[in-house]
Image (tube, helix red, strand yellow):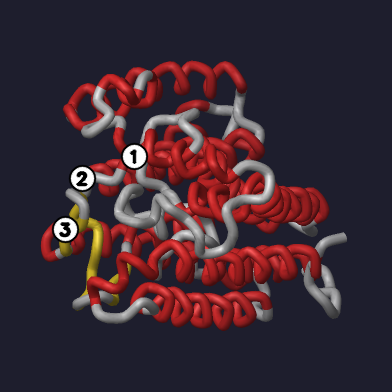
Amino acid sequence: MAKARSTPDFIIIFSTLILLVIGVVMVYSSSSIVALNKGDALFFTKRQLIFAILGVIAMFCTMNVDYWVWKRWAKVGLLTCFGMLVIVLIIGKEVNGAKSWLGVGAFGIQPAEFTKLGLTVFLAKWLSENQRKITSFSKGLAPTLGISGLAFALIMLQPDLGTGTVLMGTAVLMIFVAGCRIQHLFGLGMVGLIGFAGLIMAAPYRIKRITSFMDPWQDPLGSGYQIIQSLYAIGPGGILGLGLGMSRQKYYYLPEPYNDFIFSIIAEELGFIGGALVLFLFLLILWRGMRVAITAPDQFGSLLAVGIVGMIAIQVIINVGVVTGAFPVTGITLPFLSYGGSSLTLILTGMGILLNISRFAR
């Protein structure tokens, strides 16, 4: 194992912490009106701050744990995640039509979020140890996709298409970087598109999301409501925005503005400048994260860095695409910014692992 550097990548730390601060501020700004129904304008902000602090602690802890330790526990971690995915189907709490939460009251965990990170670590181990086999469909690609497909299937039983899409997207990215044959990946991509279309056709509400994405004005008070209200938030923001705390759409027009559609409120209150700053910070993380992957001392570290950065990039692309009307509504949060416990804590834990890899980078 290469000797660790004294300091991790400062640009990644800086960008992550700035996004986290923006997230806490914007959760307060976007949720204060809704939170008054619970008797406390800081109801959501307090919880976001607690999980942000826990996440930062987890980030700095994992930043100081040599990343190869996770390779040793990859199998146990993934099996634990599978166990939680089964348990949540039995005794989980249903929220917004998905049985995806384990916990009591306002505090709970989403096993699917743990699975995204657990599968990323496992695939980094599997692919680094079986790199010569990855060009073989039966010996390399099929087992890898089988494990990823099982995780996807368990998540879809909840159902949670958004998280499942991020999970499979990250897996495919890692498989591609590991060196699989393009023709294999292309063929499986065609099969995946057919399967994805089947999942959409199997649920009427998903069909409505697709049709509303193409023309939300066909059903402005139903399936197209969220997209229309999101665009009503982004449009008036202009270049400089309406001002922090001055959003109009958070007054019960845009559903859960502090969650999946928080970028809409950022654009409304902080304008194009604020939205561009957020995207620039994500680009900094992507750039430095890919640099860490390229300069990592071993294949495991390289693939693990690709998986963590890819997972964040896929979520950002889909979330921003949804709120701007470019993609159908999928229910994917914006990393570091959207309200949420499990997602925020786990993504910061992943950032800590990425920062540790950067300490060994050549």
**Can you name the residue that lies furthest to the left here?**
90
Quadrant, the C terminus? bottom right
Q: Secondary structure at mark 1?
A: helix
The numbered dot on residue 157 is 2
Residue 322, image quadrant: top left
Identify which residue, 223 or 242, lies in the foreground: 242
The numbered dot on residue 226 is 1
- Does residue 71 appear anywhere in the picture? no
Q: Nearer the viewer, mark 1 or mark 3?
A: 1
Q: Secondary structure at mark 2?
A: loop
Residue ID for mark 3: 94
Is 310 on the left or on the right of 94, as rendered? right
Please name the amino acid that badge 3 sits on.
Answer: Glu
Is 257 on the left or on the right of 6, as rendered? left
Q: Are dots 2 and 1 in contact, CB under 8 Å?
A: no
Q: Position of residue 331 (x, y in %)?
A: 36, 45
Please name the amino acid that badge 1 sits on.
Answer: Gln
